[in-house]
Amino acid sequence: IDPELLWFGTVAPGESVTKTFDVRAGCTGTLSIGSAVYPGNEIEAYTATFPEDWAEPYTVRTGFAFTVSVTFAPPDTNEWSGELWFNSNDPDDPVSAVTLRGNTVDDPTENVPPIVEILDPNVGEYFLDNQLVTLTAAVFDEDEAVTNLVCSWSANGSKLSSADATPSAEGTIAGASQLP
């Protein structure tokens, strides 16, 4: 999904703003999107327009993309934040999302990304497959409390699901995981 964040700025009730994003099939096979859903109440303020031939499941051949338009028409002046999820046959990332933000005080596209420092294992350290490895890191974020972050570890491009963690108030993250 490109971009992964649509920021609509401040929009008065009765007015609307439309933005677009692309969904690209960058895999080696045909991408099949089983559904596109709003997981919360953001459907009240956002309307997505899909390609004319959209039907679920929707298939996209490798290297091709389609464009989705999203219109933000808030019913009030409140902040409207949410996501539009795409459930697909992608084995590495079966749920992809575009974040939707409107009537927010700050521009989320201007946020500074978190800083992550890997403390253990050491860079270049060698491990065998199926070995249990202790993972420790520190994370810092200028824009929000680090406890709002969820951190994930990966090895050889595979997510180590048992190593997902929320940092402590000091920004420390620790866990252990079996390597693929």
Image (tube, rainbow, N blue to C red):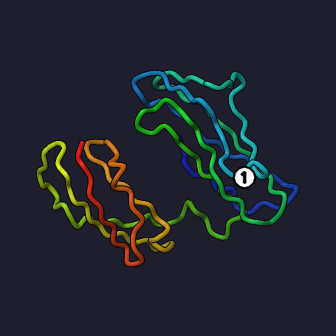
Relative image position of residue 143 (x, y in whole percent): 50, 72
Residue that appears at 66% across and 41% down: 37
Residue furthest out toward the right? 14
Left or right: residue 43 versus residue 21 is right
Q: Quadrant of residue 176?
A: bottom left
Residue in view at x 44 percent, y 63 percent = 113
Residue on which disc 1 sits: 42
**Where residue 40 sits in the image (x, y, percent)?**
68, 52
The residue closer to the viewer here, 18 or 1, is 1
| Vertical relation: 20 (above or below) 5 | above
View extreme (bottom): residue: 170
Q: Residue at point 19% right, 52% down? A: 132
Please say if 170 is above or below 6.
Answer: below
Amino acid at dot 1: Glu
Q: Is residue 73 above or below residue 94?
A: below
**170 or 48, which lies in front?**
170
Q: 54 left or right of 60?
A: right
